[in-house]
């Protein structure tokens, strides 16, 4: 152990610098001339003084000025100048016209003033009041759907699967547009095709002009035969309307159609008055028979008193002009006649009471909202001006419209309740001759700046507010 400590001490001595062992002072003895030693900032040299070798007075060492270490300033990485994104050319946004507070309550009258009486050119439906109909437009209606095929025109697909969604859609549509005043209780009588006892040529209607040239039996007899096939398996009690679905081949080849209003039939539940409709345009076109809900509603509404087919027949504007079109709504005038619209939906104004500009915020008839859906201006005892806001909604999709793509604007049309109900789809002037027609702005039904009729100007004040001004 002692040997180990001795080794450590010796090693430590060798590690200590010689000039640190004894400090050099001027005049101290040194050993060899010319040797130097540095201590306390001076450099001492060993010299011979007489007979002795001693350290001289020493020379102060001029310490070199330290070169300041300059911390290099990093050259900043230049921020690249971004390539400017070109500003796209935008369609100028029209300056919105400030909305003015609605003031229509100052001019509105009771809605009964707008119930124009129809006294001339009476038809199977109603142009005005009172509503004339085979089936009531109010309350609950029980509807039976019967899919029927024939030995010479067989049905395709499974009706139970094809029409499951239609049953729901018919009910929901009625709940929405009937506003709680009308309901459709619709039922599918059979999940499979019912085979009629005779060929398709036995179930036709010549007067209906659906392709048949002669009748082998009456329509009533044909309907009774089909009722007998399912009576007992299905309860007909309370049924008011039967909608028959026939194969396309039956209609196209034989003119199969069963269209009756208020006819008495015998069922196990007793004698009942039932209206029927059976025909899906097969005499003129091949419609999609896997979807029937909108066509069924169209036909039921005729029996409930709506003339439909206007103001522009065949258009995408409502379910009564084209049941397969972009919009499945009912016009506000026909909703008014049917009794579904009341004082919360209709603003009735007599033209003679207009003394200042009238401002009315409206909800679209396509998507019911809190504001009125119809403005009716009584022009005379037989003519009325109807203003509606149109847009896509729950049962309207104008993004897919053939004629009115992305329609979102006000429209207006005239109804003359005593003018002829003129419907001739081959006549290009049919609308002008009919009892109702649109007021157009530059040949368009969309009112974007304004239209004038009989001393009234109708112009949008904002997207949802209309301005009515009397000019004469």
Image (cartoon, helix red, strand yellow):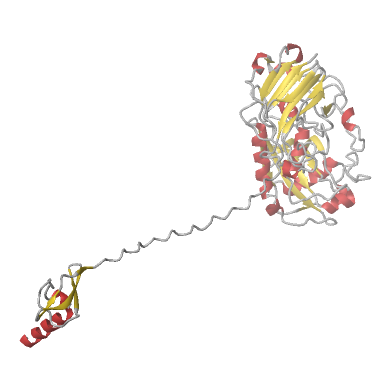
Residue sitting farthest toward the left = 2
Asked if one can make out residue 183 in the rendered structure from this viewpoint, the answer is no
What's the residue at 93%, 45% (across, down)?
A: 214
In the image, residue 184 lies at what x, y percent?
Answer: 67, 37
Residue nearest the viewer, comparing 269 with 465: 465
Residue nearest the viewer, comparing 285 with 383: 383
Asked if one can make out residue 297 in the rendered structure from this viewpoint, the answer is yes
Q: Quadrant of residue 264?
A: top right
Residue sitting farthest toward the bottom = 3
Q: Eyeballing the image, is 8 above or below 276?
A: below
In the image, residue 57 lies at what x, y percent?
Answer: 15, 70
What's the residue at 74%, 46% (across, down)?
A: 292
In the image, residue 23 lies at what x, y percent?
Answer: 12, 72
Q: Quadrant of residue 151?
A: bottom right
Q: Is residue 115 left or right of residue 180?
A: right
Considering the image in quadrants, where does the N terminus appear?
A: bottom left
């Amino acid at each position: 152990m002692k040997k180990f400590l001795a080794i450590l001490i010796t090693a430590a001595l060798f590690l200590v610098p010689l000039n640190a062992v004894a400090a050099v002072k001027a005049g101290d003895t040194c050993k060899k001339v010319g040797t130097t030693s540095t201590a306390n900032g001076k450099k001492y040299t060993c010299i011979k003084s007489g007979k002795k070798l001693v350290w001289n007075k020493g020379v102060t060492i001029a310490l070199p000025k330290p070169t300041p270490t300059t911390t290099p300033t990093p050259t900043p990485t230049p921020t690249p100048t971004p390539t400017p994104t070109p500003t796209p050319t935008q369609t100028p946004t029209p300056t919105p016209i400030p909305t003015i507070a609605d003031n229509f309550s100052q001019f509105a009258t009771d809605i009964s003033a707008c119930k124009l009486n129809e006294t001339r050119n009476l038809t199977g439906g109603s142009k005005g009041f009172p509503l004339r109909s085979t089936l009531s437009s109010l309350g609950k209606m029980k509807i039976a759907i019967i899919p029927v095929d024939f030995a010479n025109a067989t049905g395709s697909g499974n009706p139970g699967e094809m029409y499951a969604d239609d049953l729901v859609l018919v009910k929901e549509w009625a709940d929405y547009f009937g506003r709680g005043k009308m309901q459709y209780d619709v039922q599918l009588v059979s999940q499979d095709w019912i085979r009629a006892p005779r060929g398709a040529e036995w179930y036709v209607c010549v007067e209906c002009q659906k392709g048949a040239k002669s009748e082998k039996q009456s329509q009533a007899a044909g309907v009774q035969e089909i009722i007998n096939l399912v009576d007992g398996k299905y309860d007909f009690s309370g049924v008011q309307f039967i909608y028959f679905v026939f194969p396309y081949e039956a209609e196209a080849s034989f003119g199969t159609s069963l269209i009756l209003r208020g006819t008495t039939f015998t069922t196990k539940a007793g004698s009942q008055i039932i209206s029927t409709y059976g025909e899906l345009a097969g005499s003129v076109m091949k419609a999609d028979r896997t979807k029937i809900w909108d066509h069924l509603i169209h036909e039921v509404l005729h029996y409930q008193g709506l003339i439909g087919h206007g103001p522009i027949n065949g258009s995408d504007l409502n379910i009564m002009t084209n049941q397969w079109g972009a919009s499945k709504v009912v016009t506000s005038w026909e909703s008014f006649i049917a009794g579904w619209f009341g004082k919360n939906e209709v603003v009735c104004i007599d033209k003679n009471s207009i003394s200042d500009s009238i401002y009315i915020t409206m909800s679209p008839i396509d998507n019911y909202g809190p504001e009125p859906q119809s403005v009716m201006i009584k022009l005379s005892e037989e003519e009325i001006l109807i203003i509606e806001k149109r847009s896509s909604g729950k049962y309207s999709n104008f993004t897919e419209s053939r004629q009115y793509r992305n329609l979102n604007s006000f429209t207006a049309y005239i109804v003359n309740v005593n003018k002829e109900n003129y419907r001739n789809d081959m006549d290009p002037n049919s609308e002008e001759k009919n009892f109702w027609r649109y007021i157009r702005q530059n040949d368009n039904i969309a009112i974007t700046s304004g239209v004038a009729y009989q001393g009234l100007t109708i112009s949008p004040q904002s997207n949802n507010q209309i301005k009515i001004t009397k000019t004469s």
